[in-house]
Image: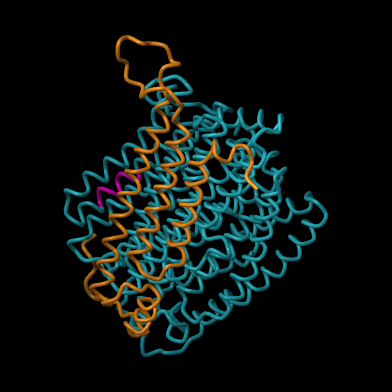
Chain colours: A orange, B cyan
Amino acid sequence: MFGPNFFHNIYSVVAVILFSVGFTTLMLHRNMIKKIIGFNIMDTAVYLFLASKGYIEGRKAPIIVNNVMSTDAYINPIPAGLVLTGIVVSVSVTALMLSITIRLYERYHTLDIDEISLRSKKDTPGRNKYKIDLEGEENE
Amino acid sequence: MTFIENFVPFSIILCMGAGIISSALKGRTSRRFSIIILSVVLILSCFVLGYTVYLGHAFVYVMGKFPAPWGNELRAGCLEGLMAVFFSVIMLLSVVGGIRGQNDDIREDKMNLYFIMIDLMMASLLALVYTNDLFTAYVFVEINTMAACALIMIRDNGHTLVAATKYMIMSLLGSGLLLIGISMLYTITGQLLMPNIHEAVVRLNETGEYAIPLTVVIGLMSVALAIKSALYPFHSWLPEAYGYSTASSSAILSSLVSKGYIFLLIKIFYRVIGMDVMVGHKITNILFVFGIIGMIMGSVTAIRQTDVRHLIAYSSIAQIGYIYMGMGLGSNAGMVAAIFHIMAHGATKSMLFIAQRGLVEVSDGSKDFSDLKGSGFRNHLAGLAFAVGAFSMVGVPLLAGFTSKVYFAEAAITAVRVKMWIAMITLAISTILNAVYFIRAVISVYTPRNMEYKDSSYKPSTNMAFALICFIIFNFFLGILSYPIANTIETGLKVFD
């Protein structure tokens, strides 16, 4: 069932499983907070994938100590850079999602997205009135 | 002349800086500032377009002068220049045209936040157009998504909040897939810059190494960007997002945000994976099928709508289907048609959204067709613009939509036999469906009834009038003088690798 590379690539396997768990949670779960958790699991899985791919057995982080200049002594720092960039992105997205969730909760008193969707349809009357000031032109 | 090359990074940084400065300005000042910045970006982009056309090939701007595998690069050819000009024109007109809408829909103290997002959106669109680095593209895709989410929710009511939430959820699914796609591509090629990845992919394709991961990567990235640009089965967020936000936001979302992602996908097609590898992996066939389904289903749903905003939104789904159908043909001609349709649809849809706002203003704020009856007589210019936009979407000659349909048909004829028949028949059916709902909409706008609304004191705002006239001219321009534009797109695609 498992090929010879299965255990060699165990981190990638775990990362892909975690990714699918997060992806499914984000897509299918009705609770907003769990959706956000799912999103974070999904992104973290990608960081695990990148970090494990960037690591080379027996080598160190690329900080020069004891004047060892040979590139064979160090790992590739770019995946770590990508992970850091990704973390910044996912933190800001999480903040945005959480703030939307707070607003939704204040308005509809529930975290269930289906329920929120239903209530929002009843919420406002079908007509959306604009205030139109026919006499005064705006300043712009 | 190489001085002009600096305009490429400068226009991106200018927009970002403008966003930061806007945060310290008062609402209306920040709008004026934003309009000035967008005009400057438009002028800079025109210079870039002129320079790249004069140059005949693309140039690469190396950020910080770090050499190739480590540095971050921007690249501009005439296609990128054309897209930058197009994006800045539509952004400028959408902002100017919707000024009265913004005043009504956005709270005074939050106005400057709206323009921060407009500036960030412009910066991210320009970066998506110009960037030569796949991971940078991912970061700007996220910035674009967040700015778009804020543009939806700035009109503070329950509908827009729910719409923004749905938009964010679908977009995050897309971003996740894109991120893991890029990471996998990085692990099998070891590169992040587009030309380097392309080299490595060509090598992998020859040796047959990592064949399955490559297919997975192609699938992941295509699906990711298809979700983000609302290709048919992933469109659930679109009607609400376009239907309830303020008119400028709807115009920007429909004609710029989704188009930015599609342009990135086209870049991935040509510059990262390579067109022949893409066609070899049959992903174009899948996009073709979903495009075809989208063309029909979008229009069929649009026929049932009684709300003008929702009608325009569902029509967008059909038009996105057209674009993916053109890309799915898998030929250069199909791609030229798709890119031309990006422009034609962008110019038309933003005009429809702004014109719709003008019509709703004179109909007591109702978006329902029964109340919109006769609004074309109450607001002449908006009625005219709505009619021009509708005719353009249906495909009446001399207008942008007609020309892009001609290009689609021409491209379909040269495609494989099966695809040719499917594409031609669907184009015909879809045109009829478009005609059914758009002509009905125009007729109801020009049906004289509800005369009690008739108020001769109504004066359309000069900003909206200006924007609508520009949009109408732009539409006729795309329809009549399409040859130089199509030519530029074709040369742009030639120098794309």
Image spot of residue B167 (x, y percent): 42, 63
Q: Residue at x 53, y 70 (%)?
A: B314
Number of numbered discs overlaid on the protein picture: 0
Q: Is residue B485 left or right of residue A98?
A: right
State whether residue B392 appears in this view: no
Residue B38 magenta-highlighted: yes
Question: Viewer-proximal residue, B244 or B340?
Answer: B244
Query: Is residue B57 depicted above or below B442 in this figure?
Result: above
Q: Is residue B282 left or right of residue B255?
A: right
Q: Is residue B224 left or right of residue A4?
A: left
- For the N terminus of chain B, the image quarter is top left
Residue B213 magenta-highlighted: no
Image spot of residue B396 (x, y percent): 64, 65
Image spot of residue B414 (x, y percent): 79, 49
Q: Give the magenta-colored segment's residue range.
A: B32-39
Q: Residue at x 76, y 62 (%)?
A: B422
Q: In which quarter of the view is residue B110 placed? A: bottom left
Image spot of residue B493 (x, y percent): 62, 37
- For the C terminus of chain B, the image quarter is top right
Q: Is residue B254 left or right of residue B406?
A: left
Q: Residue at x 64, y 64 (%)?
A: B395
Query: Is residue B253 depicted above or below B283 in this figure?
Result: below
Question: Viewer-proximal residue, A12 or B462?
Answer: A12
State whether residue A17 appears in this view: yes
Question: Viewer-proximal residue, A112 or B351?
Answer: A112
